[in-house]
Amino acid sequence: MSLIATRPTLYERLPELYRERDLAQVPPNQLRALVDAIDAVLQALAARVGAQYDDLFIETCEDWVVPYLADLVGSSHLSGDPRTLRADVARTVRHRRRKGTLGAVESQVYALSQWAVHAVELRERLAWNMPLNHLRPDAGGAPPWRTRPHDDLRTPVRGGTAALRSPAWLSFLGGPFDRFAHTVDLKPPLRMTEPPVGRNAPSLPHLGVFLWRLADYQTPGSRPAPPRAPWNQIEPVAAAPGSADIADFAVRFELHPMAEPMRLFDTHRFHADDDPPDLARPGAVPGPMPAARLTTGAPAAQPEAHVRVETYAGTQPPQPADDAPGLVLHLPEVPFAGVEWPLRRGANLCAWELGLRPPLRPFEVVVDPVHGRVVFGVGGSTPADFAEPLAQGLRVSATTGFTGTRQRGGGVGAQPLPRAFEPLPAGATLVQVDGSTVTLADALANLPDRTGPLVVEIVNSDTHTLDLAAVAGVLDPAGAPALGLPPPPGDGGGRPWTLTLRAAGGQRPVLRLVQPLRWRPTVITGVPQSAFSQFNVRLQGLYLTRAPGFAAGAALIEQAVLNRLQIEECTLDPGGALLLDGSAAGGRAPLHPALRLTADRGLEDTEQEAFGQTPEIVLRHCIAGRLAIDRAYLVGLENSIVDGGAGVQETAPALALGAATGDAETQWGAPVAFDGLTVFGRVRTERARGEGAVFVHRLEVHDNQDSHSGPLFAQRGRRGEEDVLALFARPGSCIRHSWFRGAGDRLPQHFACVFGSQGARLRFSDERFGQPGYAQLALDSDRRIREEGPDADEMGAFGFLRNTHRWKNISIRLREFAPVGVRVLLIPVT
């Protein structure tokens, strides 16, 4: 980060005569080796001097310097994510100048947590009790009910009674943007004391700080799905008595690519450093999109703040703008160029347009943000006029909410996050897939004939179908199509990746598999075993799911004859999503396995002997279904969720991680190393080492003897760069800072762990895949689960976010900056 220009090395400063003679020596460069050894010390000193200049500024200093700069401006020390601590110190002087103002509170909370926030003086929500002889309906001037918008009886007046005629206004009731008058609330304002969680309690001293703890993820230009049978995508609209203006056709869409229910969120549009302050406002915070505020013409409704309709040319729409709302509907330019969509409506579309009152009108958009459905009303004498082009060409940029951040590496599962990739190794080929000009089958064709590594990058968030049987040059032993890998790359430093499948930065493509993925070397027998250590495959940022016709009970990945399979920031669809079955709470879709890897690796006996490797399977920041992996593999799980479909209250939990061959109830699965893990289901493993896990149900470890192996993480912090499988460098099993159910567990040696059987209550915001609060620790979970994980933060897959530190830092800093007599209440919204 130094601002000092790069200087020539000491060897480059030598006269050219000496350098030429040095090259003529046998072996050459003897003088250079000597001079470079001396120069290394000088370069280190120069770098340190340059860094000292950088350390004078909070924007460029190293993390360890931040507390020292905090001392210079008189800011107290906090612990947590270095990024948030740096932002807090950088804004210290600015916040002091605006101490106690709502803008300063919102900016301060955002700097410390990166969460959306809205600060409200709750005394402003108290009802006005005025003497009849001294009526003060306003602050002077004309009475407010004679001017717009207060001349509408459906609009609430400050300090007045509730207006019951507007669903849009009523949707604010009890929330952060409530405009209704309330009587004073004298009950205790905290619904929890540890952590201090407040209620929306209007009273004179209360300052409500509303927090949106979920991040908003907007997937750009994805392809929506048609409705599931028996519903048709294009349906003529029946005439209704007394209604003349009715659409000719209804065009129906499920916004989720797999036609699953999806809760729509608004995008976060907040600028912490604006002057004057940019206070949070409805529609610009990452909360659930309210259906009542989507209807055109209704009081308090602002459909343009939530839904936008655009047209695009070509095959893919452009990226949504920075100020884009939560849902952007991209219509093809032909035939919709110049077509206005003046009418929008929010409604329950469980029965699609059949339940709408009034009926669907021409060029009206109806959105169901609770279930993720959209219906378009179009005209035309035949479906070919508007309905069919819309059904084929619609793309959507829909926003969902999930635990995480929008920074690089800040999510779990496949999310449209920015990504930074390593430079391509020598001899590697980059193929970009858009699904139209270049498909996945094109990119993977004749893979065994390639002479170097292959990087396949999917450049959009479209849905891509991969049929291995249709890929040219695919291996097909025993009727199971497998991708044959090209020769491994040469020694280019670091780990060589023979094949990489990845999403471009800011994209979240969906891969629909016709059959399970399989990888193996093209030739095994007659090849030196050392060569197989170079066969590595990496998946990054992909959403893997099943296409229609996928074999029932099959896993997404069923063969990995590799040295290493590394899956980063991917979702291996576990199933179990919300199912609209007519019940009030909804049912649950069938569960699916993610990996099934057998000990024989799908090879002949002679091939197994020639292969001679122990494949490594590593999942980082992933969501996956059940893992059935035999002991012939090593498994690493880092900041991931393994979903076997068994929540906390499940009485007959299924295996989430176990063996793939034989009876899984009696066999032992692969050894597991983990660093941040949440498992919904039982686990049976040969060996386990790691920390920061939440095992929702029984954990059974075969190697449960005291190995006296010393420190678990030698020279490795929780967020270190070292591979999680390095934990296996020490013998035996050992688990630290984790939660166990305490009922029938077979545990190895453990340290600083807590047990549900000893009163450590575990609760999640939601246990169903696809819901916004999926696998998020509830605030009323036991304090030890939230605070006694690694780095004194929460256990589970989201521990790396340090959410406990964020909450505590907000409480500490607001106590310092709040005016005398003001009580700050932290109120979570999501």
Image: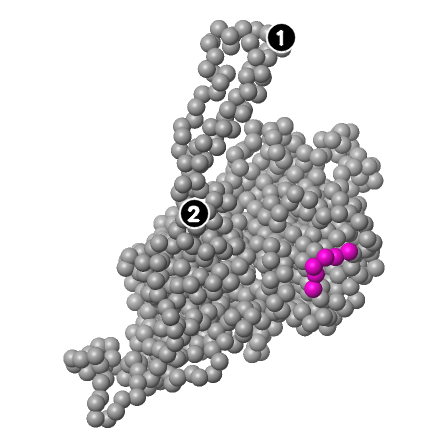
Q: In this rendering, which labeled residue sits more in front, label 2 or label 1?
A: 2
Toward which corner of the image does residue 26 lie, by quadrant? Answer: top right
Is residue 672 shown above or below 307? above
Q: Quarter of the image for the N terminus: give it.
A: top left
Is 830 or 801 nearer to us in this picture?
Answer: 801
Q: What residue would you read off at disc 2?
A: 69
Q: Which residue is located at x 46 percent, y 52 percent?
A: 85
Q: Is residue 440 magenta?
A: no
- Tell me which segment is drawn in magenta: 749-754
How many residues crowd around disc 2 within 10 Å: few (fewer than 14), some, or many (20 or more)? some
Residue at disc 2, secondary structure:
helix
The amino acid at mark 1 is Val
Residue 306, image x, y percentages: 37, 65
Residue 419, image x, y percentages: 49, 45
Q: Is residue 752 magenta?
A: yes
Is 346 or 802 nearer to us in this picture?
Answer: 802
Residue 728, image x, y percentages: 74, 45
Q: Which residue is located at x 73 percent, y 51 percent?
A: 689
Is 477 or 407 nearer to us in this picture?
Answer: 407
Q: What residue would you read off at disc 1?
A: 26
- Name which of mark 2 and mark 1 comes first in the sequence: 1
Q: Which residue is located at x 80 percent, y 49 percent?
A: 708
Could you tell me if residue 472 is visible in this image? no
